[in-house]
Image: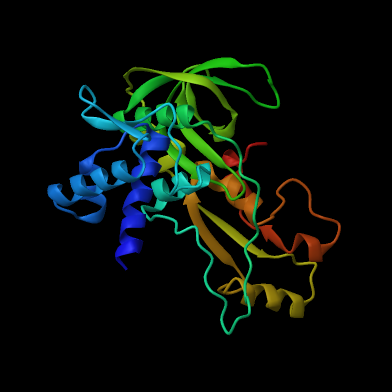
Amino acid sequence: MEKTITHQRFQLLELLAYWEGRVNAKDLESYFKLSRQQSSADINRYKQQLPNNLHYCTSHKAYLPTATFTPRYISTRPDEYLHWFHSGHLSTGERQLPVYGISLSENLQLPARKIAPEIMRGLVAAMRQQKRIDVDYVSLNNPNREGRTIAPHSFINTGLRWHLRAWCEKSEDYRDFVLSRFRGVPLLRDKTQHTTEQDYGWNTLVTIILQPDPRLSPAKCEVLENDYQMQNGQLHITTKGCLVQYLLREMQVSTKMLDGTPEAQQLICVNLLDIKEWLFEG
């Protein structure tokens, strides 16, 4: 038990040092509800075990990762940090022992998209401090680096990848950026006036109404109704306006053209006109 507790504390130390660029005793105190004495003792134990990973910076009043920082308790996969940032729970990173010696489940191991820690550190700092930040960004439409000044406020997990929700000064609107497509070293700027509160798409709740494709037989419709626990043959899902398109994609609901095979289409959106303003294709 003691070994597990120590592992978790060291895991948080490395997670914050690697992805946020700093960690101190207050972080352990807050997360694990420890005394100042205990949290300081844990940091000292970690430094005794891995003396070349952290150094104390008096100006920051925190421990910073050294140039030779080599984590032992985290994977350095960005989704590990983002899982903690989003849920507040540390990932164990361990497979459960099979029941009766037989593995009864399996998770898809999707490829991790690369996110440089120095980029993540800048973005997280901008979010926590509500500041503007200069970054370079690439996309399939423009694969050459383009400078952007943004004010990020939230990470978004859309299933297969992570996005960053931010005010974009070039677009003069709130936009979603693919997290793995930032480049270079971010430059933190001054305070921003564009926060979560002003983001209309983030604060507007939209209800999507889905039902089985009417081309399906009644028996097949009943299968889908049972799958999704529909009421009166419909499924109502409420989400943020800016997340409508992502949700429909995750549910594999086509909004432009029905699949030729109803068994492939399965679900259709009943209130398409109500949600049209939130679809990327308009």
| Front residue of 18 and 212 | 18
Q: In the drawing, does residue 168 fall left or right of residue 193?
A: right
Q: Is residue 48 left or right of residue 18?
A: left
Q: Where is residue 200 in the image (x, y as percent from the top left)?
A: 42, 36
Observer able to see residue 76: yes
In front: 118, or 235?
118
Residue 34 sits in which quadrant? Answer: bottom left
Quadrant occupied by the C terminus: top right
Measured along the vertical axis of the image, is residue 85 above or below residue 223?
above
Residue 89 in the image: above or below residue 47:
below
Rendered view: 92 above or below 84: below
Q: Which residue is drawn at 55% across and 74% down?
A: 231
Q: Which of 190 and 281 is in front in this view?
A: 190
- Quarter of the image where the N terminus is located: bottom left
| Image location (x, y in percent) of residue 275 | 58, 46
**Which residue lies at the image location 42% right of the left edge and 29% below the top edge?**
123
Task: Give left or right: position of 190 versus 270.
Answer: left
The residue at the far right in this view is 260
Number of on-image labels = 0
Spot occupied by residue 235 in the image (x, y as percentages of width and height): 57, 66
- Residue 134 can be seen in this image: no
Check the image and tell me how it is coloured.
rainbow
Residue 105 on image: x %, y %: 62, 72
Position of residue 173 in the picture relative to residue 258 (left or right) = left
Query: What residue is drawn where x is 41% and y is 30%?
Result: 121
